[in-house]
Image (spheres, coloured by chain):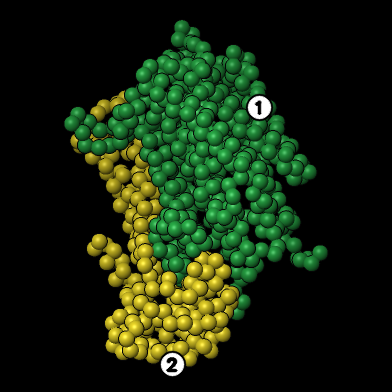
Chain colours: A green, B yellow
Amino acid sequence: MQDEPHSPLHHSTAPVVAPGLTFASVTDKISSIVLKRKTPIWWFVGFAISFILFQLMLLTITEMLFVGIGLWGVNIPIAWGMDILNFVWWIGIGHAGTLISAILLLLRQQWRTSINRFAEAMTLFAVAQAGMYPIMHLGRPWLAYWLFPYPNTMGIWPQFRSPLMWDVFAVSTYATVSALFWFVGLIPDFATLRDRARSKPFQILYGMLAMGWRGSARHWHRYEMAYLLLAGLATPLVLSVHTIVSFDFAVGIIPGWHATIFPPYFVAGAIYAGFAMVLLLTIPLRRVFGLQSFITMRHMHNMGKVMLATGLIVGYGYVMEAFFGWYSGNRYERYMIWNRMHGPYAYYYWALILCNIITPQFLWIKKLRSNLLILWLISIVVSIGMWLERFVIVVTSLHRDFLPSSWGQYQPSMWDWTMFIGTLGFFFTLLFLFIRFLPMISIFEMRTILPEAEVEE
Amino acid sequence: MSDDDINNEWEHDLEDPEPFHHAPSGAAHGRGRGAVALYGIMAEFDNPSDLVAAARRTHEAGYRRINGYSPYPIEELDEAIGFTRTSLPLIVLIGGIIGGLGGFFMQYWMEVIDYPLNVGGKPYNSWPAFIPITFESTVLVASFAAVLGMLALNKLPQPYHPVFNAPNFALATRDKFFLVIEANDPKFRHDETTQFMNTLGAMGVNDVEV
């Protein structure tokens, strides 16, 4: 017990970085993954599988352009089906990346340093998948540019009172700002790669991306300011995005959607799903690349705890949904809750409760939280649970609303699944390319948290 | 273009001027010596503490056109070279204000003036419904202001810079630290300055050509 004066906040004993690392070893280890190491065989296998699945998406989109969105299982009254629920699922996953990179930066959580680059990449790639769904769901996706206010010969403008327009602006802003944030974070690392690369083409490629970065103190000063300001801007932005996504539902008057709890409940759900995805991806990655000294058990513990906390908020959301349904005294709201629990989609509802409320309770136990296999399995269960949550919200609310004569049933078609699997393929295709060609851990930020970075005066 | 100039003017007013107006004038006027145009003299260090201490001593010795180079941001270094202010927050604030007003009044103009449309009996100026997009456009323009403003003030992209000529400088993005006194510093005299830098405990002191 050398560091005796333990602050009460210091409950996790695992360090943020393993001892013994130096500027040189951190730089060489992370950049060697990109520059020197032979591409492992599993990379080719994984990339090939992802790329094949990605073709399913292209196939589905092509077929959809010929046939129309009747190809999918959607019809009145359930016009939103899997497209919108997958949109919400994907964009929710993205939120953890921004949370890790922006909010944890403002809260001065050093442990974010080794996972923020990867989580931001995950954000970008997830938002790319999310964006595809509403565009395809337009029916005439080739007219998607009508969503933007541009001067046109029809002499009309978009209808800005609609949450669907808010969504367009929120998601496109989110995608743009995430990309900016990610790129700015990469500039100094591009410079490192430029200076480490041996082959001319890569020197030129990374050199162009680094834009002449040379680590000047004046540059760093403005850079740090820009990074901090971007974090400050991204923080309310990420909260606004899922809030606005929830407005798509909450502003509608459908029973089960028209609830004031939706914004915070959606945001918590997004972070919950996002951390599950980060764990799902980092647990295998840190193993195959031997990054245990950068991504330590401390990270796993913390991410497990964030997942537990947000899971509890989501659980509170479910309880309140049921309570509001009952307490409203409104027969349609009451029926909606009854129908969720006992109707034709009751299996989905109870599976969702099992996945999202019961399973994360295991995270209370430190032993289970420290077992990476269990943590990984819980992450899968939570990812499925969050998908089920969106299914329950979208489908059970729409399929039986006010008039029994307009009730209906929804069955996803084969093409719904090929589209979903296809976007998973696209997501992993992008991720495989990312881990091969860009440093998946922020090298310059890792240097700042090393012991030797301390300036002695 | 003119915006950038104004911003750079702003930064010029600060205690330390921008460092990267190249040296030839200074060097050619014979402050450097002779034929080779000199950008400055560079000292190399292998840890941040030595760099910060050296930078502080250099600043105290009266040199002003000095700069440090490091593989990661060092807060103490900014103070040591006397560069602690930037107009970037102001640029971002202006960007945010433009984005916010632009976003709101874009909607106002479209929904109230150019194409008034009665939607569910709501007022044409249903301002609460315009807030989400106003917020998003504020963040969007402010973010672009932050990134483009940072790049513009740093004068990036800049493919060529004299310091890249210095020996070992490729390690500035790995584990080495550098301090430069530029040749256009008023106090710069080649021999004296070299001598001074040799007393800073550096691992090496080299001329950097333009």
Residue at mark 2 shares a chain with residue at mark 1? no
Note whether residue A252 is visible: no
Residue A299 lies, with reference to residue A240, above or below; the image says: below
- The residue shown at (40%, 81%) is B40
- The residue shown at (33%, 82%) is B37
Quadrant in the rendering for residue A70:
top left
Note whether residue A153 is visible: yes
Residue A26 lies, with reference to residue A370, above or below; the image says: below
The answer for which chain carries disc 2 is: B
Residue behind mark 1: A353
- Find the residue positioned furthest to the right: A1
A330 vs B209, left or right, is: right
* Camera-side residue of A365 and A426: A426
Which labelled disc corresponds to residue A111?
none
Tell whether label 1 touches label 2 (CB within 8 Å): no
Q: Amino acid at mark 2?
A: Glu
Dot 2, crowdedness within 10 Å: few (<14), some or many (≥20)? few
Instruction: Please state, as top left, top right, bottom left or bottom right, where the N terminus of chain A lies in the image.
Output: bottom right
Quadrant in the rendering for residue A355:
top right
Which labelled disc corresponds to residue B192?
2
How far across and how far down the image is residue A446, in percent? Answer: 59, 60
How far across and how far down the image is residue B201, in percent? Answer: 56, 85
B169 vs A46, left or right, is: left
- The residue shown at (40%, 35%) is A167
